[in-house]
Amino acid sequence: MRKKIFLISNLFFLIGILVLSSCTPLKRMNYMQDKESSKEVKNNKATYNYKLQPRDVVYIRVLSIDEKLSKFFNVGDNSSAYTTNMGVYISSFSVNDSGYVELPIVGKTLVRGLTLEEARSAVQKSINEYLNQATVIIKLVNFNVSVIGEVTRPGNFPILDEKVNIFQILGMAGDLTIYGNREKVMLIRTTNEGTNTFYIDLTDKNIINSEYFYLMPNDVIYVSTLKTKPLGFGTFPFSTILSAVTTFLLILNFMKVK
């Protein structure tokens, strides 16, 4: 009997060791925690507004009371073209390497380093020289973010607002799976100076002060897999362990009968 109890105790001890060694504390699954050891990053993105760069694509539309005149300043007068992403893209303007967009009749307007509102004002000023009481609309067309790795719905997501943060895009991707590493999410960003990678800790609330909190066009987010699986009460394999213990006890009883 003592031998039986000793074997059962050892079995539960081994099971406990295996569980503890293969589990990730649920605390690592929570977002935006208070972490005293975290470095505070200067909050230079609190009033974030994206600034146009060369090779950006912007949709520009000029509207006025006189439609016959305003159509000369627009590319693609077929309104049905604006019902698809490709139609909008074809009817848009690229920012050239020098930072200019070139509109019909108006010519070149410098928009490099300007926010969308500043760019709209610059184009509006150029249009006012040719057309009275006109309204200029400008939108960023090439804002796409890719999310890959341990997320529910990986893919490439078009962004309709030039101001989107990492939690919003992860929400579009269905959030991280339980196996996603929330403490080391990789952000791949391509700029005119080249491609760089940065790591973001989603469990630290100071992320809102990070310069990488807001995303830029063509950013890629990669969520790696945890080395250990996070197990809580909802995912703990109680049935499997209970079945194993029951089988073990039946074997012991069988040996005893023998």
Image: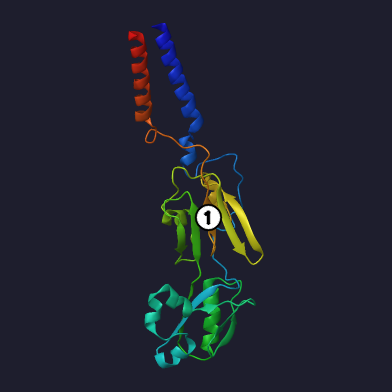
* Residue shown at the point (44%, 11%) measured from the top left: 6
Spot occupied by residue 18 in the image (x, y as percentages of width and height): 48, 27
Spot occupied by residue 173 in the image (x, y as percentages of width and height): 43, 55
**In the picture shown, does residue 56 fall above or below 242?**
below
Spot occupied by residue 196 in the image (x, y as percentages of width and height): 63, 58
**In the picture shown, does residue 141 fall above or below 170?**
below
Give the residue pinned by disc 1.
Answer: 221
* Residue shown at the point (49%, 32%) measured from the top left: 22
Spot occupied by residue 53 in the image (x, y as percentages of width and height): 60, 71
**In the picture shown, does residue 227 fall above or below 4?**
below
Q: Nearer the viewer, residue 18 or 51?
A: 18
Looking at the image, can residue 66 be seen? no
Q: Secondary structure at mark 1?
A: strand
| Left or right, residue 111 beside residue 255 | right
* Residue shown at the point (33%, 17%) measured from the top left: 250
Q: Residues within 10 Å of mark 1 (few under 14, many from 20)?
A: many
- Residue flagged by tag 1: what amino acid is it? Ile
Looking at the image, can residue 220 be seen? yes
**In the picture shown, does residue 128 fall above or below 218?**
below
Q: Nearer the viewer, residue 1 or 253?
A: 253
Q: Nearer the viewer, residue 123 or 228?
A: 228
The image quadrant where one finds the N terminus is top left
The image quadrant where one finds the C terminus is top left
